[in-house]
Amino acid sequence: MPFHALYRNRQNEAPYLPRQWYLSDAEMLQWVGKDGVLIRRTDKLDPSMVRGMILHHPVGFIHEMKNSYTILVAAGLEPEVERVIVIKELMHCYFGPDGGGIFATDSQMALESHLQKFFGNSFALRSHATEAENKALWMALAVICPENTRVQYRAKAKDDPNAIQELAEELRIPLHQAKALLSPQFDSEIKSILQ
Amino acid sequence: MSDLNTLKNELFGDSNSAISDIKFYPGTSRENSIEEIAGTILAAIYDVKAGNGEAIDLSF
């Protein structure tokens, strides 16, 4: 998965990077290309139901646009939340031109199954598509924060109760996602992704 | 036609324009039906296809 190169490149950068950096990297993927991702905020997406999504589609799906990926985010979100959503959705570009094969939601039947399992919120109803959703979120967290910064903050958090808040502020992400970055689960998730 | 069926048809009904993947970031509530969720997804897609939607400042 080309995510490995992104992860490696990210380690050489500052702790905080704007979303444009992530978009520019994704647009260097051969199957994405320059101007390959259209990102729009819309008040038609109800944030109580869906806060963001990415579609991979033929050119022309959005009239007169040359993009083959479209990311939509709900209007009215906290900037930190919106930031994580856009980066998470960009991670799906790194699954490859076929969306990772078995991970792709690429038919009417797959879409209905995906909606039922992902939004049904039942752990017993996991699928390859819901696995891809979870994986993309961990991938996003892993490139939102360089590993050396994460290690520093994890050590600091042992003695300093404000460390997680400081990490959230430095990375400009929600507090609960800074907590996830420092959690033992992060280690196992990112190890699995990088294998 | 239900919103779910309309959404499935919008995304996959025409083999020449069918999408090859779609993924989501969940909402703040888990109390909505799949039909309601399909409705808001559909509305958002129609909105952007109509040329609406706001470009995002990616400097943050």
Image (spheres, coloured by chain):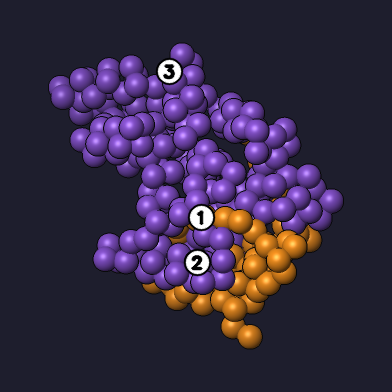
On what subunit does the disc labeled 1 rest? A
Q: Is residue A111 left or right of residue A24?
A: left
Amino acid at the residue labelled 2: Ala
Q: Residues within 10 Å of mark 1 (few under 14, many from 20)?
A: many
Helix, strand or loop at mark 1: loop
On what subunit does the disc labeled 2 rest? A
Chain in orange in the render: B
Earlier in the chain: of badge 3 and badge 2, it is 3
Q: Position of residue B53 (x, y in %)?
A: 71, 53
Task: Write down the residue under mark 1.
Answer: A104
**Disc 1 to disc 2: CB gap under 8 Å:** yes
Write the residue at 50% across / 31% down: A2
Mark pair 3, 2: CA separation = 36 Å
Helix, strand or loop at mark 2: helix
On what subunit does the disc labeled 3 rest? A
Task: Write down the residue under mark 3.
Answer: A11
Mark pair 1, 2: CA separation = 8 Å
Q: Are marks 1 and 3 on the same chain?
A: yes
Numbered tag placed on residue A110 in the rendering: 2
Q: Position of residue A85 (x, y in %)?
A: 50, 45
